[in-house]
Amino acid sequence: MAEKETLCTKESRCSSACASRPPNIADVPLLDLRDSTLLPRSTFQDAYDSHQALHIRGYEPSNVADENAVFFHAGHVKGLFDSLGEQDKASWCIENKKNHKAADDDMDAKPGNFLQNNNKGRGYCSFLVQHSIDELKDLLTSSLPLVHLPVKESDSKDDTTVMKVDYGPALWLFFGKNYNSNESLLGRPEHTDSVTHDGTFHYQLSGTKIWRLRPTTELVEAMANHNQNQQSSPSNKKRKIEENDSTGREESNRHIEVVCKEGDILLLNTRLWWHSTIIPPQAEPCISYARDIYFTQQKEDSAQEEQPNQESSMTNVDGTYAAEAIEADTILFTEHNMPDIELPRTKTDPNCQVVELEDDNGDIFMAVVSLRDIKEGEFFSLLESDDEEASGDEDCSEEVREEEE
């Protein structure tokens, strides 16, 4: 088995050379809702299916005309957090603390202090609403201005039915302040998410957030094949980016910036897009929330309909992922060069295992080896043993996912 450098260190890959746009992924598709309340189904699908990303502008809540309607806003965030159970409060996370200067921000304060709606402080945090059932129900039934993607079930002009999708178990809330500063505030360094859903929609509740996106090699190849299938002369050959394919490599190393302002929606497949976020200086809190989605039309039987619920608990933690595609039976690291990390353990499609190997001198050493081919950006997970399952390690039942931003 060959040993190779496979560990990604979460350092941003942004540089001035990323300013130019790739030839086939020029930008994220943009749709405007100013002339309608719902997008036609086919218009939505054509835009999202091709890029696995979609920017929607012009959304207005359906009951915006109701002068008595009071939607969730910055003044409600602290009260929401205070009302959550201990499990959800424990999901509080700084986005990313190592990118923040302690002298300039307020992130060392308690969450309750930082979440106050005032013009003080500088920082960027997130937390989940998942186990606090009553609070989650209230948000989804009456408080949030956007709960479902504004897409019709069909293309009919008279259709007012919202497209049916299933949602993940958690609502993600992101809260940032960048007052009294001339510098932008960085979120987590560029990353992908190890997830199984079809995408995540982010609704910009207030303020402005800048997304920096870069397609994975897998997405570039998929888009090339999609474009090829649209041509008049079909071919059975699928395009794959090889080491000497400079065009494909350039596409996967260039960034796209998407500026989300209040009322904007960004739907993104965070497994296929490297992504990071920036909060520019502004005089109001930057607040957004997110929901994971599963397209119900892709399910074939009742057993699959329960798929979203298999992700019974989401966690707001960092993971360690492959910086490039890795073949099966590759030594990722050994006991001699193991980084200071803890890999999640699972019995559901793990991609690594711990094995004993023998060196040239006959000495035995431990190593982490890939069980199967691992895609670029996929998070490492170890095979869980029967002994570990019996020990009652609850963390092994959770899907450990890099938080969405």
Image (spheres, grey):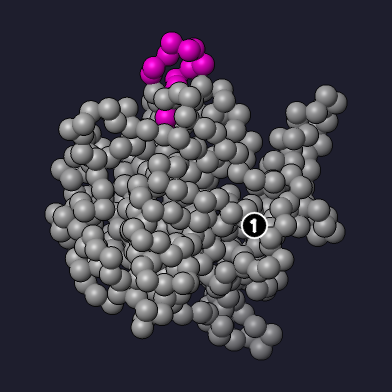
Q: Is residue 156 magenta?
A: yes
Residue 181: give x, y in percent of width and height. Answer: 41, 72
Q: Which residues are magenta?
A: 149-161
Residue 268, above or below 163: below
Residue 333, above or below 400: below
Residue underneath mark 1 = 255
Q: Quadrant of residue 62?
A: top left
Residue 143: give x, y in percent of width and height. Answer: 23, 39
Closer to the camera in the image, 126 or 169: 126
Closer to the camera in the image, 269 or 204: 204
- Asked if one can make out residue 348 in the rendered structure from this viewpoint, the answer is yes
Closer to the camera in the image, 384 or 18: 18
Task: Report the label total.
Answer: 1
Residue 263, above or below 370: above
Residue at 81 percent of width and 53 percent of height: 247
Q: Is residue 68 magenta?
A: no
Residue at 46 percent of width and 80 percent of height: 340
Q: Quadrant of residue 111?
A: bottom left
Which quadrant of the figure contains the C terminus?
A: bottom left
Answer left or right for 214 relative to 310.
right
Which type of secondary structure does the marked residue at label 1 adopt? Answer: loop
Answer left or right for 30 relative to 254.
left
- Asked if one can make out residue 365 in the rendered structure from this viewpoint, the answer is no
Residue at 62 percent of width and 67 percent of height: 14
Amino acid type at mark 1 = His
What secondary structure characterizes most of the magenta part?
A: loop
Which quadrant of the figure contains the N terminus?
A: bottom right
Residue 240: give x, y in percent of width and height. Answer: 77, 47
Q: Quadrant of residue 294?
A: top left
Residue 48: give x, y in percent of width and height. Answer: 57, 35
**Crowdedness near tag 1: few (<14), some (14–19) or many (≥20) residues, C-alpha within 10 Å:** many
